[in-house]
Image (cartoon, rainbow, N blue to C red):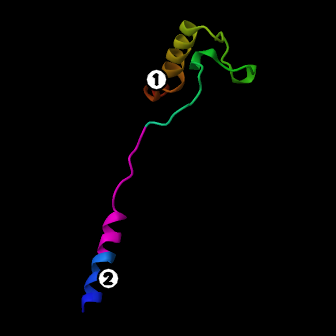
Amino acid sequence: MKTAIVLTLAAAAFAVAGCTEREQTAGGSKSDQPAYTGSTQPAFMAQGWKAGDRTSWEQELKVRAERGQNEYAKTTH
């Protein structure tokens, strides 16, 4: 009888332990360089963007967000 209670409690403890959620932390890129420093391969560079120029990088992101990733703008043209 005592063994059955211990086994039941152990099984319940394992079942409850499996329901917990792991801590989530922000992963992301581990690069020491800022994103606007760019790539050395021209195939990955947008036309008109200059590698290493932060203002050019920010302008290119604005243009991409407005023209390429804005579904509302795609449907109204």
Q: What amino acid is labelled 2 in the image?
A: Leu
Residue nearest the observer in this picture, 20 or 64: 20
- Cα distance between the residues tagged 2 and 1: 62 Å
Chain part drawn in magenta: 12-25
> Magenta stretch containing residue 38, yes or no?
no
Q: Residue at x 57, y 20 (%)?
A: 35
Q: Residues within 10 Å of mark 2 (few under 14, many from 20)?
A: few
Residue under the image location 43 percent in, 27 percent down: 72
The answer to whether the residues at label 2 and label 1 have Cβ atoms under 8 Å apart is no
Which of the pair 36/6 is nearer the observer? 6
Residue plotted at (31% across, 66% down): 16
Mark 1 burial class by Cα count in 10 Å: few <14, some 14-19, many 20+: few
Secondary structure under badge 2? Answer: helix
Q: Which residue, as the protein is rendered here, is positioned at the far front?
A: 2
The circle on residue 7 is 2
Give residue 9's position: percent from left, percent from top. Answer: 27, 77
Residue at numbered disc 1 = 73
Place of residue 65 in the rendered image (x, y in percent of width and height, measured from the top left): 49, 21
Residue 36 at x, y percent in the picture: 59, 16
- Total number of numbered discs in the rendering: 2
